[in-house]
Image (spheres, rainbow, N blue to C red):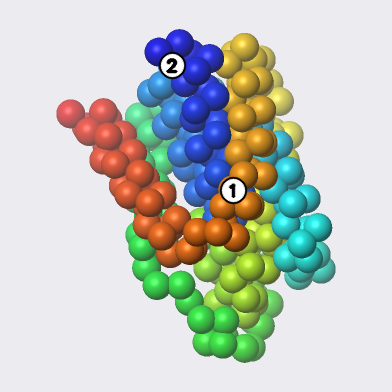
Amino acid sequence: MSALILALVAGAVVGLALGALGGGGSVLAVPALIYLLGFTPAAATTASLIIVTATSATALYAHATAGHVRWKAGTAFAAAGIVPAALAGAAAARLPQPVLTAAFAGIAALAAMKMLSPAPSAGAARQVRPVKAAGTGAGLGALTGLLGVGGGFLAVPALVTVLAFEMQAAIGTSLLVITTNSLASLVTRSGGAAGVDWVVMAPFTGAAILGAWDGKRLAAKVSGPLLQRLFAGVLLAVAAFMLVDVFV
């Protein structure tokens, strides 16, 4: 199968995940870039941030037009992650590639477990804890900078439990957090973009953007739990494959 077709298919899946679930797409983008398209782990994390920034911004617009974005709270949550994202992005270039791959596999497994666990109830946390919210936002920013993932799979449950958002608002607002953190991390990786194969990246990103719109429509037709289980299964398989590749 040609690299162009692989890029289009992988991009569509990434966009579907981000548009439908508000996260999870970037955890699929990095292994797709490494194992399907031949990117190094370092180049894949930089390329993933470019893809995730463009796709999340598109999905954010779609959710914002539906009134599912809490701009004030989301901006404050995202602001806490800007500096950690930039610092972690600079540090990522100095880590050995096997370490990045193993860390990413662990994050993919964690994302799958989060998707398989029952969705937290918005009523379970009526008191907003600013310190905890800021700490969670900072942690998501560091994760974005280090591994090239947007952190939406963690942002959605965090927004529900810490800020007591309903699920639709959490998904829409998580896209604001993802876009902000990804942009902050890209600032420190500007030199890394020179090694990105744009012949592959352009169709990948284009398919992801279109997939994000389809994901938004899909979320309205298919139950959220079913979508989460499907993506969780894919993520567990990806995590297992990456760990075998590193340690065997």
SS under mark 2 = loop
When the figure is inspected, residue 27 is found, relative to residue 32, above or below; the finding is: below
In the image, what residue occupies the spot 55% across and 44% down? 16
When the figure is inspected, residue 230 is found, relative to residue 183, above or below; the finding is: below
Q: Foreground: 47 or 246?
A: 47
Task: Find residue 203 and report its horizontal and vertical position in percent.
Answer: 62, 21
Neighbour tally class for label 1: few under 14, some 14-19, many 20 plus, Cα within 10 Å = many
The residue indicated by pointer 2 is 38
* Amino acid type of the residue that numbered disc 2 sits on in the rendered structure: Gly
Task: Find residue 213 and report its horizontal and vertical position in percent.
Answer: 67, 44
Task: Find residue 113 and report its horizontal and vertical position in percent.
Answer: 35, 59
Q: Foreground: 78 or 56?
A: 56
In the image, what residue occupies the spot 37% across and 45% down? 235
Q: Foreground: 147 or 5?
A: 5
Q: Foreground: 39 or 80?
A: 39
Quadrant position of residue 158: bottom right
The residue indicated by pointer 1 is 215
* Amino acid type of the residue that numbered disc 1 sits on in the rendered structure: Gly
In the image, what residue occupies the spot 58% across and 16% down? 200
Neighbour tally class for label 2: few under 14, some 14-19, many 20 plus, Cα within 10 Å = few
Identify the mark at residue 4; answer none if there is no mark: none
